[in-house]
Amino acid sequence: MSEEEKKDYAESPINLEYHYTAGSATTRFLNQVKEGKIVGQSCPKCSAVYVPPRGSCPRCGVATNIEVPLTDKGCIESFTIVHIPIPGNPIVPPYVCAMIRLDGANISFLHLIQGIDVEEIRIGMRIQAVWKPKDEWTHSLENIKWFTPIDEPDVDVATLRFQES
Amino acid sequence: MKKVAIVGYAQHPILENAGALNEVELIMPVVHQLFDELGISQNNIDFTCSGSCDYLQGAAFAFVEGLSAIQTNPPIKESHVEMDAAWAMYESMLKIQMGDADTALIYGFGKSSPGRLDSIISLQMDPYYISPLWPDRVSLAAIQARVLLEKNIIAPEQMISAVIEARTNSKNNKNALVTELVDKEAYLASEKISSPLNEFDCPPISDGSSAMIIASEEKANEFTDHPIIIEGIDHRIESSNIGSRDLSKPSGILASIEQLKLEKIKFDVAELHTQFSHEVPYLQSVLNLSDVPTNLSGGPLVGNVMMCAGLDAIGKTYEALKSNDLTNGLAHASSGPCLQHNMLVHLEKKS
């Protein structure tokens, strides 16, 4: 823009920095993830198991203070095939993002599915975590590279719906 | 008009830095404490309303996450104000007066430690002309302090007294953050942050939460023989354009005083949402509180949880009336720069 050109606007960028804290419950969870263990937390009232735990059972409004060790196996509760490349994302489309329901958990979390043609992926498919090498483990679920199908019969996801105890 | 009473109030210990505790983990204890004290649960609550500011957490819709602290199954009627929870109480009160609810749970929460409060608060200003200048909260308050001092509406000695008294009164509040006493010498030796304000004139960076339960008068009688009624409540807003305000003329508060007919009431106790020392003598004079014990809890100068401190003023007034042989209390909540918003709440204990 030349100096003579009239500028009828002003830019005022806003940058705010925060020291984000996960919360004491999620901190316990992430400390276990660092060791390659997935430990959910259970509600003392309704017994729902949360992974990853955020500190409370949002159904009952109480702290999830019971630790529940889980395996890294589960099933695909839902999924989507991503065809659009995201700038900076090293994964080449098409790839699959899935809601992973670990065995024994009552909520699912988002992760990648690899090791299978995307057209073959289906809801209810049994999967297991593929971990990064141990020396790369941090306080993050990214310690799991992705989930990959295992040779077990599919699960009817309708049976996973939370049952009031 | 249906009368509404406060039946319970709980405050989290005010922390300088709650560290790993997230907002949900701060809210749950105060809500459970209230429920336990009253022997009720979320199932007995008709309406739930919270006050918080997403900018404090640095995440859009962060207030929704706060709901994870509340039992939401079966589904609840719920609302939120992006303001101090004192305004969540106001909304809840209206809900009860309209006949939509008989009981309401109010909670406020805020962690000031994760971000830079000075920057965050400047974003509440007019986004075109003022926010881009990033005026910090202390400097804005200092402008008003300067005006009040220069017009001799308050005196520097009154600011010192406000600081010393707040520290002394902090012993009355087990949840206070700042309890260290301060004398005139230490005050005068302190460097100015933004003249005329030094660090003692300013509230501490605070993390915490508070909760309150209110109910229709009828319902309140089930909880207590001496309900504490919200006899009057009035909220006024001054211009958001700080340059067009006379910072020494509290026109909004004066209108509230008239509306609530406060000049006729002999108050026994008052709690003011005075974040800076100069605001204490200023409001005491505007509200004619010279003979009224004010901020016996220490007030925001000894613990100032953003989005809670206004509700805390109401809560502390409620507590003072409840545990003493007192009848009339005045609570004040504020918001915005230089006391832009002011809400006056007249509480009365029924004998």
Image (cartoon, coloured by chain):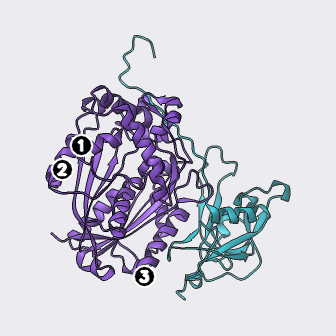
Chain colours: A cyan, B purple
The tag earlier along the polypeptide, 3 or 1, is 3
1 and 2 marks on the same chain:
yes
Secondary structure beneath dot 1 equals helix
Q: Which chain carries label 2?
A: B
Q: Which amino acid does label 1 sit on?
A: Val
Q: In which quarter of the image is residue A151?
A: bottom right
Residue B193 sits above or below residue B15 on the image? above
Figure quadrant of the C terminus of chain A: bottom right
Reading the image, the residue beneath label 2 is B257
Q: Residue at x 70, y 61 (%)?
A: A141
Secondary structure beneath dot 3 equals loop
Q: Mark 3 lies on which chain?
A: B
Q: Which residue is drawn at 67% across and 61% down?
A: A27
Reading the image, the residue beneath label 1 is B286
Q: Which amino acid does label 3 sit on?
A: Gly
Q: Which amino acid does label 2 sit on?
A: Ile
Reading the image, the residue beneath label 3 is B39
Nearer the camera: disc 3 or disc 1:
1
Residue B305 in view of the camera: no
The tag earlier along the polypeptide, 1 or 2, is 2
In space, the residues marked 3 and 1 are separated at their CA atoms by: 40 Å
Q: Which residue is drawn at 50% across and 45% down?
A: B204
Judge the density around disc 1: few (<14), some (14-19), many (≥20) Cα neighbours within 10 Å: some
Contact (CB < 8 A) between labels 1 and 2?
yes
Residue A8 sits above or below residue A5 on the image? below
Nearer the camera: disc 2 or disc 3:
2
